[in-house]
Amino acid sequence: MDTTHDISALLEENRTLKNQIMTLQETQDHCIRTEKLASVGRLSAGIAHEINNPVGFVSSNSTTLTGYINRINEILAMYRKGIDRDIIAKREKTLKIDFIIEDIGNLLMENIEGLARITNIISNLKKFSRNDNGSEYMNADLNEAIRSVLVISKNETKYYADIKTDLGDIGMIYCNISELNQVILNLIINAVQALKELDRENLGQITIRTYKDSDWIYCEIADDGPGIPNQIKSKIFDPFYTTKEVGVGTGLGLSICHDIVVTKHKGRITLDSEVGKGTVFTIVLPRYKDGTNE
């Protein structure tokens, strides 16, 4: 009887632990989604600005093109009415038709480029903000993810940092790329915020480098900011720990980065920093499923 009771107790304890693990997993996924939405919220003004710029000149160019078309239509109407060619030629000169014909091509090219920029921003924003299921792992291109994050964070970075990339031939990686997008964005924004603290006249430097060896893929995100003092390095990945002012940071960003890389992807995230010289975060990810060579 005692043995049966012990087995029942163990089974019940096992069920309780499983439920607790599921609850923790759900909470963890919720935190990641919340942080992702918070990141998009923080970047929203900058993203809107990056979209508004091309929208502005596309709108202006379109108004100009409308005026050009009206002038061309006036000349066409004169030809159709059989008006004397000399009179038409004088009117063409007055309306600057030769210039208009040349400028129409330039305006159309600018509009095409502007619309392409808008499409690119929206496409990269959709890649970043999509709500993937936590179990949705697939082969993905980490370099492409980095490029996407740089597009949507451009307005946040361009006033404080010159971004340099050295993206190696690392191939595909089995991962949840949506979650790694969040890691990359958090580390870039942290670097930008560190550079802002220095209040320099010139732009700071952020360098993003990827490379691989036989088993691992590496992503280094380095800045030449103020660096991190030794006494707080051990706390940097702790939940809710932050050195930022109230309202600037939640203290969850680096903790979430650590959890995504270490717990969910069986990788490592390391910190190398020297006060006055800058900081390097290195993400290390297995090239294969579950960190094995399979």
Image (cartoon, grey):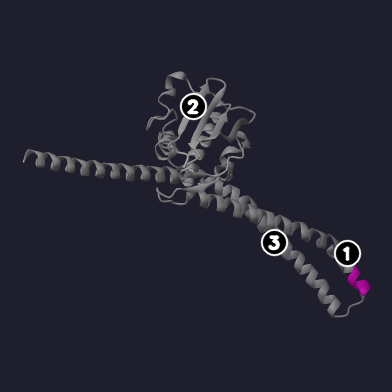
Amino acid found under the numbered disc labelled 2 = Leu
Q: Disc 3 versus disc 1: distance between alpha carbons?
A: 21 Å
Residue bearing mark 3: 63
In the displayed structure, 233 sits above or below 191; it is above
Mark 2 / mark 1, whichever is N-terminal: 1
Which residue was labeled with disc 2?
A: 271
Q: Secondary structure at mark 2?
A: strand
Residue range highlighted in magenta: 85-89
* Residues marked 3 and 1 touching at CB (< 8 Å): no
Q: Residue at x 40, y 51 (%)?
A: 133
What's the amino acid at mark 3?
Thr
Residue at numbered disc 1? 93
**Label 1's element?**
helix
Crowding near pointer 1: few (<14 within 10 Å), some, many (20+)?
A: few
Query: In the rendered view, does 26 fall on the left or right side of 242?
Result: left
The Cα–Cα distance between marks 2 and 1, rounded to whole angstroms, is: 68 Å
Query: Is the residue under label 3 in contact with that under label 2 (CB below 8 Å)?
Result: no
Q: How would you rate the neighbour count of disc 2 (Cα within 10 Å): few for under 14, some for 14-19, many for 20 or more?
A: some
Residue 264, position in %: x, y? 41, 40
Residue 174: % across, % down: 48, 44
Q: Is residue 250 magenta?
A: no
87 is within the stretch colored magenta: yes
Residue 142: x and y in percent read: 54, 43
**Dot in front, 2 or 3:** 2
- Furthest residue to the front? 294
**Which is the main secondary structure of the residues drawn in magenta?**
helix
Residue at figure coordinates x 67%, y 57% from the top left? 58
The one nearer the camera, 10 or 80, is 10
